[in-house]
Image (cartoon, helix red, strand yellow):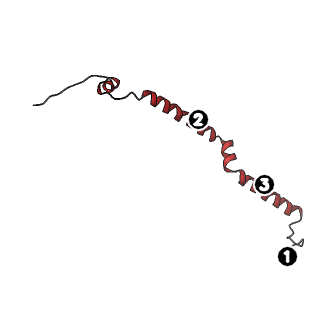
Amino acid sequence: MKIHLDIDCTPDEARRFLGLPDVAPMQEALMKQVQERMEANLKALEPEALFQTWLPASIQGMEQLQKLFWSQMASGGSGSDGKSEKS
């Protein structure tokens, strides 16, 4: 013997009929938190913020390297003892 039932109801009606909890408020709160976190992360992805977080030490190192090059050029390329090296 076979029995075939077709039930036409919405998911909300089925949930209430089966006694399952309504998780819509929890989902809304969770989605709000996810949205806030995504917005905060997107702000961190702005080019200026990326350069500030990734390159501060590198930029300072580049500035020091540039100053070293300029000082060497200004002194005529001499070595540390003040005499130019000949090959």
Q: Is residue 62 above or below residue 30?
A: below
Q: Please identify, in this view, whether the residue under mark 3 or under mark 2 is nearer the observer.
A: 2
> Among all residues in the image, which is located at the extreme left?
1
> Dot 3: what SS?
helix
Crowd class of label 2 (few under 14; some 14 to 19; many from 20; radius 10 Å): few
Residue in front for this viewpoint, 23 or 73: 23
Q: Residue at x 70, y 46 (%)?
A: 52
Q: In the rendered structure, which amino acid carries the disc numbered 3?
A: Glu
Location of residue 62 in the rendering, given as x and y in whole percent from the top left corner: 75, 56
The vertical placement of 26 against 59, above or below, is above
Using a 10 Å C-alpha cutoff, classify the residue at mark 1 as few (fewer than 14 neighbours), some (14 to 19) or many (20 or more): few
- Picture coordinates of residue 49, whole percent (x, y): 67, 42
User: Considering only order in the chain, which callout, 1 or 3, is on the residue closer to the N terminus?
Assistant: 3
Q: Which mark is residue 11?
A: none
The residue depicted at 17 percent of the width and 28 percent of the height is 4
Q: Amino acid at mark 2?
A: Glu
**Residue position for label 2:** 39
Mark 2 vs mark 1: in front: 2
Instruction: Identify the secondary structure beneath mark 2.
Output: helix
Q: CA distance from mark 3 to mark 1?
A: 29 Å
Identify which amino acid the numbered label 1 is placed on.
Lys
User: What secondary structure is found at the residue carrying circle 1?
Assistant: loop
Q: Is residue 17 left or right of residue 25?
A: left
Looking at the rendering, which quadrant does residue 48 occupy? top right
Taking 8 as reference, is 70 left or right?
right
In three-dimensional space, the C-alpha distance between marks 2 and 1, rounded to whole angstroms, equals 60 Å
Q: Nearer the viewer, residue 13 or 71?
A: 13
Residue 71's x, y, as percent? 86, 61
Disc 3 or 2, which lies upstream in sequence?
2
Label 3–label 2 contact, CB within 8 A? no
Numbered badge on residue 63: 3
